[in-house]
Structure formats: C-alpha cells, structure tokens
C-alpha cells in the first residue's frame, strides 16, 4: 500500500466510500468456495483502498489548484466558487478589478422564476341583484346618513 499524508485542511469535507452490504457479503461467503471468496474479498478490499486513495488524492490536487488560482487572481477571488475560478482561467485577460467585481456579485439562481401576473378583479355572477345607491353631497360636507363631517 502507498498512502501519503497531507498536512493541509481541505475546504470541503471529503466523503468516503460506502461500505459493502453485510448481507450481500454473507450470502457470497455461503455460496462461494472459501478460497475463491477470500481471493475476491482481498481483491475487492485492495481495489476499494486504491479507489479511496485516488479520490482523496484527486480532491487534494483540486484544492491545490484552487489555492494557485486564488494566489493568481488575488484575495477577492477567495469568495468565488471553483467553477467561477475555472472560468477566469479560460478568459484571455482578467484584471484584479474584474475579479473583485465578480466576487461581489450575487450568485445566480437557476431556473429564473418570472413573477406571476395578478389575474385582476373578476366579474360578479349575473344572478346577484344589482343595487345602485346614490348618496347626495351636501354643501357643508356632512354625510346625510351618519351626520359626520367629511374632508374634501
């Protein structure tokens, strides 16, 4: 086995592989001959260890690349996601001012949701009775029904 240790802390937690289903392992142990089961189990554990190591190594290399990009584009780029930093690498010329402006901009949320139009007022049903009431205005601005003075 060849494992390397890295002293740096990753910015995103590393997720490990799921363990094999114990019922499946017990079923294989019962159905396969002992020598074949031990050989397969050993080979599988070696492959799982290698895969775990390679996934971790890949994550460490991605983190190193992120740190190099942050160093390249300045302290404002720390706020950018990995995808945004990758896009900056693809641009022919990026100034630190552009990086600062991009880091201050809010993240876009997809898909865009359009505001729903209000349906407006609906017609009253035709079977309801229509009552028209006209309230006469007096000269001294007093309501004829309630005798309260109203401002004009």
Image (cartoon, grey):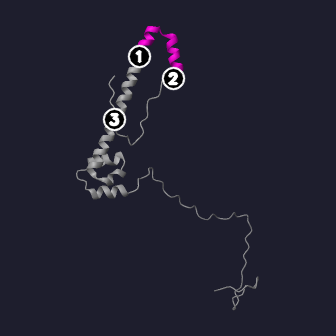
Image position of 149 with respect to 128: above or below:
below
Q: Position of residue 5 (x, y in %)?
A: 34, 32
User: Where does residue 32 sit, x and y in percent of width and height?
Assistant: 48, 10
In front: mark 1 or mark 2?
Answer: 1
Numbered disc in front, either 3 or 1: 3
**In the depicted structure, whether residue 97 falls above or below residue 14:** below
Q: x%, y% of residue 115?
A: 50, 58
Task: Identify the mark at residue 6; answer none if there is no mark.
Answer: 3
Name the residue located 72 percent from the left edge and 87 percent from the top edge: 142
Q: Nearer the viewer, residue 57 or 32?
A: 57
Say what secondary structure mark 2 lies in. loop
Q: Report the disc number at residue 42.
A: 1
Q: Are marks 3 and 1 in contact (CB under 8 Å)?
A: no
Q: Residue furthest bottom?
A: 139
Image quarter of the N terminus: top left
Where does the image place residue 33, in percent across and percent down from the top left? 47, 8
The numbered dot on residue 21 is: 2
Taking the image as shown, residue 117 lies to the left or right of residue 76, namely: right
Q: Is residue 37 magenta?
A: yes
Please report the residue visible at 50 percent of the width from the left and 14 percent of the height from the top. Answer: 28
Residue 42 quadrant: top left
SS class, disc 1: helix
Segment colored magenta: 21-42
The majority secondary structure of the magenta stretch comes to helix
75 or 27, nearer to the observer: 75
Residue 124 falls in which quadrant of the image?
Answer: bottom right
Q: Secondary structure at mark 3?
A: loop
Marks 1/2: CA distance?
16 Å
Residue at image point 37% right, 27% down? 51
Lower sequence index among marks 3 and 1: 3
Q: Is residue 63 magenta?
A: no
């Amino acid at each position: 086995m060849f494992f390397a240790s890295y002293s740096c802390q990753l910015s995103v937690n590393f997720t490990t592989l799921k363990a094999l289903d114990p019922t499946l392992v017990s079923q294989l142990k019962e159905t396969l001959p002992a020598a074949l089961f031990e050989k397969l189990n050993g080979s599988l554990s070696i492959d799982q260890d290698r895969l775990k190591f390679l996934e971790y190594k890949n994550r460490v290399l991605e983190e190193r690349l992120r740190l190099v990009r942050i160093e390249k584009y300045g302290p404002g780029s720390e706020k950018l996601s990995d995808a945004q930093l990758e896009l900056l690498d693809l641009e022919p010329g990026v100034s630190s001012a552009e990086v600062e402006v991009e880091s201050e901009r809010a993240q876009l949320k997809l898909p865009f949701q359009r505001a729903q139009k209000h349906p407006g007022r609906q017609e009253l049903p035709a079977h309801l009775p229509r009552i028209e009431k006209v309230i006469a205005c007096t000269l001294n601005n007093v309501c004829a029904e309630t005798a309260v003075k109203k401002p004009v």
